[in-house]
Image (cartoon, rainbow, N blue to C red):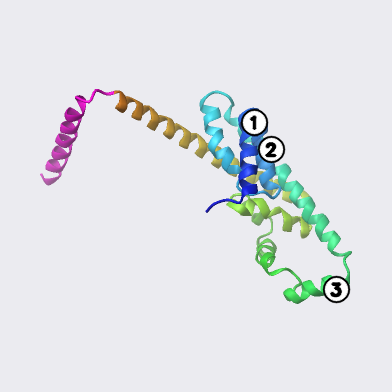
Amino acid sequence: MELPDFLVAVQEFCGGLVQKYGAWGVAIAMLIESAGVPFTSSVVLVAAGGMILSGRAEFWMLFLASTVGIIVGSLISYLVGFLGERLGYLVGNQVRNRRKAETPDGRPPRMKKIYTFLEKYGTYSIFAGQLWGVTRTFISFPAGAMHMNLFVFIVSTALGGALFSLWIIGWSIILTGAAGLLLRLLKIITSLSPWTWPALLLCAAALVYLFFKKRRT
């Protein structure tokens, strides 16, 4: 699926920040995503492993930066949701009546499911929401609108954000290491003399033959 132009621009901006400022760039990228702009964590997935394996940054530095960025961005989203809900009380009866007409409890249909999830699972919903894709970006808005206890929200966000940071940076290291190994193997293979290819193919065929012969016996 092709991303909209503005999301591509945001990703490029965050990518530049990560490459230029390292851990600070990671913190800003995760803050932007948690504040309501999805998909910027993919920049961290691409860049973090390379920075760690090349010695430009330490694992725990990036882990802390990512977690702090998630917490601060989520707090911004929480505050927006909180103030937005408060502002909703100030609008005229016409607007309130229109919202009530949309659903029996007055919530827009697209938000009803996430409100139900929050009401049912409470603290766990914030922790779990930090672990999955777009839910990490938007889970904090309804939490603020529902006036979830701020301390509980911060703790749940910190735990979920820390686990997500471990996951994304760990995978970045694995993918970067695997890509580096593949490039080294390709470099070795392409540097071989053309005369070695028949010998390698014969050896491979002999190994396959011995393997299947042993299985039959």
Is 193 part of what is drawn in magenta? Answer: yes
Q: Residue at x 68, y 69 (%)?
A: 109
Query: Which comes before the other along the chain, label 1 or label 3?
Result: 1
Amino acid type of the residue that numbered disc 1 sits on in the rendered structure: Ala
Is 85 part of what is drawn in magenta? Answer: no
The quadrant the C terminus occupies is: top left
Residue 68 image point, x, y percent: 69, 38
Residue for badge 3: 94
Which residue ends up furthest to the front in the rendered image?
Answer: 5
71 over 114 or under it: above or below: above
- Callout 2 crowding tier (Cα within 10 Å): few <14, some 14–19, many ≥20: many
How many numbered markers are drawn? 3
Of marks 1 and 3, the one in the foreground: 3
Magenta span dominant secondary structure: helix
Residues drawn in magenta: 192-217
- Whether tag 2 and tag 1 are in contact, CB under 8 A, the answer is no
Residue for badge 2: 28
Report how far apart the C-alphas of labels 2 and 3 lie in the structure: 40 Å
Q: Is residue 118 visible?
A: yes
What number is the disc on residue 23? Answer: 1
Residue 122 image point, x, y percent: 69, 59
Q: Secondary structure at mark 1?
A: helix
Report how far apart the C-alphas of labels 1 and 3 lie in the structure: 48 Å
